[in-house]
Amino acid sequence: MTLYKLIILSIAPSLFIALYIYFRDKFEKEPLHLLLKTFVWGILISSIVVPIEYFLMAYGSISASSRLSFIVFEAFIVAGLTEEYFKRLVVLRVAFDSPHFNQPFDGIVYCVFSAVGFAAIENVGYVYQAFQASPDAAVSVLVLRGVMAVPAHAMFGIVMGYYLGFAKFAPESRSYRYFKASLVIPMLLHGFYDFVLMLNVYGALVIVGVYEILLFAHCLRLIRKSQEISKLYF
């Protein structure tokens, strides 16, 4: 398979998930230009995230007292905190104050678009890197990340958007609590996902697979709950 086809296929899971979330928005579809802007900024923000992650990795390799502490730092801080912070920042800068962000479910929509934009360019990078070894290696990476990593980013985005949507519309006494949760909870979910994979223990992929199934079920509940609340805004 050619590199061009692999790159197109590596973006496809992100586009599929974006369309799925777009059509789950039952009450008032978001404007396409704002969704596209959020998606593109999700891609572009990687140019900031990657250097920060390299810096943090270098710091962690020097300061970590053990392999386990380094893995915890890499999973929860380098990947979890850094990536979720900047994916949320995209939504805060691009869409949060828009008049189109007018119901709690919109938080899920925009956060997923930011997340899958980031996941798309990350996927391209990994597939391209694997292609340097062999086309077969690139296909393996494409399939594995397409069914695990990209959906994981999307689900972290659903959780983030659920809380960010409530942060915008909840009473002031509860808004800040939701706002904090919109970063802390996705960070922890992301960190655990990476932590298990980085441990590289026997059965890690099975553990992560079960984790993603449970997280998917939880995300469906969050979507339904957010939609129920969003009904009240129409």
Image: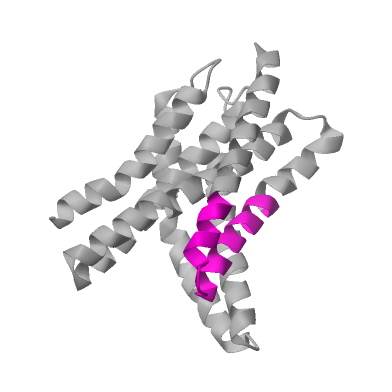
Please say if 175 is above or below 70: above
Q: Nearer the viewer, residue 139 or 21?
A: 139
Please say if 119 is above or below 220: below
User: Is residue 80 highlighted in magenta?
Assistant: no
Which residue is located at x 58 percent, y 22 percent? 99
Q: Is residue 167 left or right of residue 46?
A: right
Residue 214, can we see it? yes
Q: Nearer the viewer, residue 168 or 3?
A: 3
Which residue is located at x 44 percent, y 53 percent? 148
Residue at the limit of the structure toward the right, as seen here: 173
| Quarter of the image that includes the N terminus | bottom left
| Quarter of the image that includes the C terminus | top right
Q: Nearer the viewer, residue 189 or 183?
A: 189
Residue at the limit of the structure toward the top, as seen here: 234
Magenta stretch, main secondary structure, is helix
Residue at the limit of the structure toward the left, as seen here: 2
- Expressed as whole percent of the image width and height from the top left, the position of residue 37 reads 42, 36
- Expressed as whole percent of the image width and height from the top left, the position of residue 27 reads 56, 15
| Number of numbered labels in the structure image | 0
Residue 86, can we see it? no
Which residue is located at x 47 percent, y 73 percent? 54
**Quadrant of res 85:** bottom right
User: The magenta stretch spans which residues?
Assistant: 184-212
Please say if 135 is above or below 27: below
User: Is residue 202 highlighted in magenta?
Assistant: yes
- Expressed as whole percent of the image width and height from the top left, the position of residue 91 reads 55, 40
- Expressed as whole percent of the image width and height from the top left, the position of residue 161 reads 61, 38
Q: Nearer the viewer, residue 187 or 203?
A: 203
